[in-house]
Image (tube, rainbow, N blue to C red):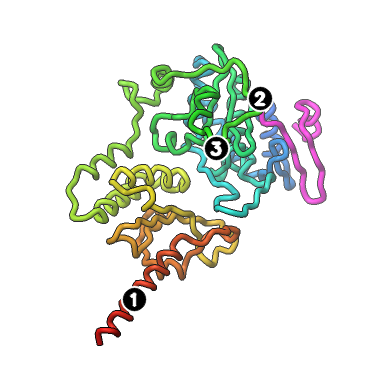
Amino acid sequence: MEIEELKKKHDVQVDYLEDFVRIQVGETKTAETYKDLADVVRNYDGKIVVANGIMGKATKEEFLKGEEVIDEIVEEINPEWSKKQKAAYVHYKMGKLITYAPDFHFVGKYANDFTAGTRNIWKSLAEGKSVCNGITSIQRNILARVGINTRELSSDTHSFLLVETEEGNIITDATWDLSNTLFKARPMYFGKTYEQLREPERNLSNAHKLENPPDNVIGISDEQLREIYHSIGLTNEDRTFRYPIFEKFNEVNSQEFDSLEQKIDTFLDMFAQNFSEEATHLSESRTMLERCIYEFGIDPKDLTTKFVYTKDDEACEEPYLAFYINDEKMKNQIKLLDSKERQFKDIQLKEFDQEYTVHNLDTVKPFWKRYLEERQESQQRDIEENDKMI
């Protein structure tokens, strides 16, 4: 099929630019549309890029890689499943496919580029990272190919999904469930009513606040949710979720250690060895590791986590996950997760300060500076006290 034939048959926008061709296609077209589009892109000799709506652009290689991922998911979906089952499966797959990688992962001033690749369906799938409205677009695209109507729900700060089923509309938020679905835990944001989403946010957040909440929304009970996921092969026989990290955590927590530091180091080593693939999903690993470390008795106010970058990474493209525990025996060092080497390493505060920094647009003072200053002040007081004694 030629480009002009594709344009006429499927009503896609084609722009012939100076150095390349840009095809813009909606995210909820039919499976036939994307099959014909893939044939055109695959056989085109020149430079060609694909955008879903106005969201970024995927290169030929990224588009075809993304299509491979989508084809695999569609192939895994049983045509006999109900719409709820299909939506539940796609919701669960997002944790495996995508890590949340915002283009504003720092506190304070931020840049928000709405043409960024994290919002392009195929580029996101090829790179394995996206943001909330990119994740919503991926879900809508896959579900459209299996005949399910959806609608994006958008607040001022967040995007999630409305799915039409045989029994009524259901709301899902795969972004907020990425950590749970990556680690095979129970999804917490599938089949919530609008009121259930908003209740814990009262006076705290407007993430799910909508000017016009959708009608005919049904909720899914815990029992129904477990039955749905059991029916598509994603739970144990007793309808519990597999959640392997929970078992590993219990193994470590049940052992006797000489110190809290030794227990935490053992747990982090276990995590790096047993969940090395999950460790490449930094945002979701951060959430899960925080949960586990709190269970060791660490007060949340004594645990600080932060994405940091080497000082020679001026574009802030390769984040590392830093952990700081304000415990007497651990407070002079940072525990750093290197997702490429898939291991943790301990770095003394002074050395860490020399090698790493926060995002270059972060307006908040790096958390470790305060601890360095406190340490220096303490050392200075010790020197002064010794001088008085001499």
The quadrant of the picture occupied by the C terminus is bottom left
In terms of secondary structure, where does tag 2 sit? loop
**Which contiguous range is marked in magenta?**
1-28
Residue drawn at (48%, 31%) of the image: 200
Count residues near mark 2 (Cα–Cα under 10 Å), then give few for <14, some for 14-19, many for 20+.
Answer: few
User: Are dots 3 and 2 in contact, CB under 8 Å?
Assistant: no
Residue beneath label 1, please?
A: 381
x, y percent for residue 74: 54, 26
Residue beneath label 2, please?
A: 212
- Between marks 1 and 3, how big is the CA–CA gap? 43 Å
Residue beneath label 3, please?
A: 205
In the figure, is residue 33 to the left or right of 138? right
Q: Viewer-proximal residue, 201 or 260?
A: 201
In the rendered structure, which amino acid carries the disc numbered 3? Ser
In terms of secondary structure, where does tag 3 sit? loop
To which quarter of the image does residue 16 belong? Answer: top right
- Between marks 3 and 2, how big is the CA–CA gap? 17 Å
Q: Is residue 79 visible?
A: no
Looking at marks 1 and 2 on the same chain, the residue that comes earlier in the sequence is marked by 2
User: Are dots 1 and 2 in contact, CB under 8 Å?
Assistant: no
Looking at marks 1 and 3 on the same chain, the residue that comes earlier in the sequence is marked by 3
x, y percent for residue 168: 57, 14
Looking at marks 3 and 2 on the same chain, the residue that comes earlier in the sequence is marked by 3
User: Residue 311, relative to residue 91: is it above or below?
Assistant: below
Residue drawn at (42%, 66%) of the image: 352
The quadrant of the picture occupied by the N terminus is top right
Q: Is residue 307 magenta?
A: no
